[in-house]
Amino acid sequence: MKATHGLEEVQKALVSEIDEATAFTRPNNQHSILELVWHMVTWREFIIDRLKPAKTAAYFEENDWRELDHTDKTLWPTGLQKLQETQEQLLYLFQNTEDAILNQPVKERSYDFRKLLHGLIQHDIYRLGQIAYINKFISHS
């Protein structure tokens, strides 16, 4: 299965513009960029796990919007690293998997991998838009 890297390049460019202070800011008490990045990581970890299920879907649901200690400054570089690592893992796994997997059901879900991957792409576009908006909002405040 071939994968494109266009969205990955946009993601890298976008997060490279964000400094730590901006990443940790919660505008109007909403999610910070840090929280959005970790949320994206959880989605990727879920998909990776569904290919070789080891954890229950409930595990990922519980950790989706995990509480993050906004005083722990290691969370930003760690989150960015995890985002990149999980992206690379996904690309590797799907590039080295037969296309037939797209029609197979996702364990503990009522949809197949094709729908799951489409959902990830749509989710990334939405969340990256939020990140860009928050970054712009904070930088112009």
Image (cartoon, rainbow, N blue to C red):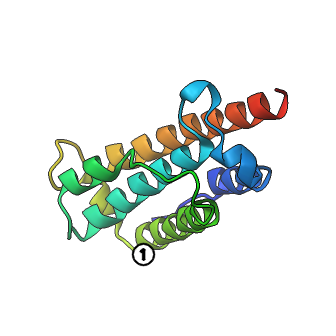
* Extreme residue toward the right, this view: 140
As shown in the figure, which amino acid type bears the numbered disc 1?
Asn
Q: The C terminus lies in which quarter of the figure?
A: top right
Looking at the picture, tell me which residue is in the foreground, 47 or 22. Answer: 22
Residue 106 visible, this angle: no
105 displayed left or right of 127 = left
Q: Nearer the viewer, residue 72 or 42?
A: 72
Q: Pinpoint residue 112: horizontal percent, then vertical percent.
A: 25, 48
Residue 4 % position (x, y): 60, 57
- In this orientation, which residue lies closer to the viewer: 114 or 139? 139
- Determine whether, in the image, residue 136 is placed left or right of residue 63: right
Q: Which residue is at a point 44% across and 46% down the rendered structure image?
A: 120
| Dot 1: element | loop
Position of 39 compared to 88: left or right?
A: left
Q: Is there any visible trace of residue 26 in the rendered image? A: yes
Quadrant of image for the N terminus: bottom left
Q: Which residue is mark 1?
A: 96
Residue 11 x %, y %: 67, 51
Residue 126, position as x, y percentages in the image: 55, 34
Identify the residue shown where x is 61% and y is 24%.
Answer: 28
The image quarter in which residue 104 lies: bottom left
